[in-house]
Image (spheres, coloured by chain):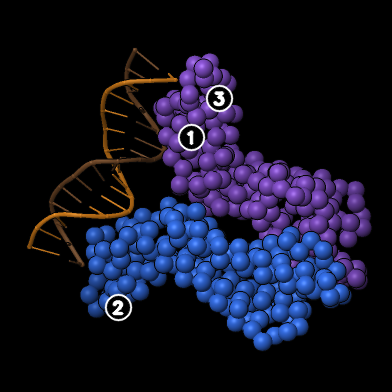
Chain colours: A purple, B blue, C brown, D orange
DNA sequence: CCTACCGATCGGTAGG
DNA sequence: CCTACCGATCGGTAGG
């Protein structure tokens, strides 16, 4: 005998709700991109028909917007929290990088969507998200510049250094596997070490 | 008076050929992604109708395949050429990174498409491209490991280090501007320095 | 290079 | 939650 009632793609048991729809969308957007994912595929993943999705969402664009804005806002909040109360600039850069790297190992799908489909967002959501990302890059740049001024770092190209550090972390989402040889924490630790080296820690 | 004959999106002069179609596709794929680009948009960019494209290509998938496979093969060839005849492991890593970083500043559109739409490729092209990329990552990993064994580098996590170096270079395509403050050569030079730091050059 | 057209599929709505 | 259906658009072909 199969599970209770059918042999759907999904576990056939859990009731479909808004959260399940968002989760299925997240998985498929991460796998195939926003334009590469049809609502019929999201529905199929949940074992329902396409029109039924509209009981749990307003539109495909809404799914993307919520997902990307919430993720980006969390990234900024995590950055602020990570450096809060820490005075040493080296430690601030270490913690900022560690939390960013950790997120990209533990929230791979969100990271892939944010970095691939940001331009699929309608305004004003797109501008809002880009502004948060810009703020994050500038904050990292300032950490490098401050450390260089105070003689803790040797790196003078703080803008390039910030991009290098952030984007190297983003890429973790592309290769990290939960069942791989390294834990998310271990990867985050190693990458925060790389960040300090890029900054030119003396 | 306008240009010779019309006010098309394109310069109205140059005859459309296979190379012009590939170039328009490259620009639009880089901007909106493979699934986000319609053949009608490529045609519009060239000032012709969609069916006319078929005088210069076989299919949309063909455009993507040629573009991605040629680019990836060039990347591997450039890597081999960059380290050819160079014995010192530090200098090999420096040159391998510099040529890879430089390519991502000078071939931004190709890099964006390769890194965004690789999974849109049909087999066997997809597997071929992934194999070339894997080979490249393993080669960088081996350089780091060899340098660590010989005491030139301190980095032990050669696999993570290789990913960090390569992906940091890939990201150049996302922010580099030809009319920006730094030349492509200067960026490549700075990034190759970051690579040696990630590897833990003593 | 074009017009005319193909079947398929898209996101979304009507109306239970 | 469904069936039935909407107009729009997709990649691609026929046939000049």
Q: Residues within 10 Å of mark 1 (few under 14, many from 20)?
A: many
Q: Which residue is mark 3?
A: A11
Subunit under mark 2: B
* Left/right of residue A18 with respect to residue A85 in the rendered view: left
Measured as percent of width and height from the top left, residue B155 is found at 82, 66
Task: Tell me residue B9's x, y (percent).
Answer: 33, 67
Measuring from the top left, give residue B11's x and y in whole percent: 33, 74
Q: Residue at x 67, y 70 (%)?
A: B139
Q: Quadrant of the N terminus of chain B?
A: bottom left
* Comes first in the chain, label 3 or label 1: 3
Is A79 situated above or below A10? below
Q: Quadrant of residue B90?
A: bottom right
Element under label 1?
helix
Q: Is residue A79 visible?
A: no
CA separation, marks 3 and 2?
57 Å
**Mark closer to the observer (3, 1):** 3
Q: Are marks 1 and 2 on the same chain?
A: no
Mark carried by residue A124: none
Locate residue A188, reporting x and y percent: 79, 52
Residue B14's disc number? 2
Q: Name the residue nearer the viewer: A114 or A156.
A: A114
Snapshot quadrant of residue C8: top left
Q: Residue at x 34, y 65 (%)?
A: B45
Residue at 60% across, 53% down: A115
Q: In front here: A107 or A161?
A: A107
What label does residue A42 carry, if any? 1
Q: Which quadrant does the C terminus of chain B fall into?
A: bottom right
- Depth check, mark 3 against mark 2: the one in front is 3
User: The disc numbered 1 marks a residue on which chain?
Assistant: A
């Amino acid at each position: 005998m199969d599970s209770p009632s059918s042999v759907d793609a999904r576990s056939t048991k859990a009731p479909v709700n808004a959260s399940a729809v968002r989760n299925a969308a997240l998985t498929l957007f991460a796998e195939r991109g926003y334009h590469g994912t049809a609502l019929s595929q999201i529905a199929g993943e949940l074992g329902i028909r396409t029109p039924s999705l509209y009981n749990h969402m307003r539109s495909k664009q809404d799914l993307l917007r919520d997902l990307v804005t919430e993720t980006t806002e969390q990234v900024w909040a995590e950055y602020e929290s990570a450096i809060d109360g820490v005075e040493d600039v080296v430690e601030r850069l270490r913690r900022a990088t560690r939390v960013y790297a950790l997120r990209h190992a533990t929230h791979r799908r969100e990271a892939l969507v944010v970095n691939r489909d940001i331009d699929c967002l309608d305004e004003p959501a797109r501008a809002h998200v880009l502004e948060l990302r810009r703020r994050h890059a500038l904050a990292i740049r300032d950490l490098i510049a401050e450390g260089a001024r105070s003689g803790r770092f040797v790196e003078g190209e703080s803008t390039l250094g910030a991009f290098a550090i952030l984007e190297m972390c983003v890429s973790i989402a592309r290769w990290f596997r939960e069942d791989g040889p390294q834990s998310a924490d271990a990867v985050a630790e190693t990458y925060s070490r790389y960040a300090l080296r890029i900054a030119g820690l003396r």
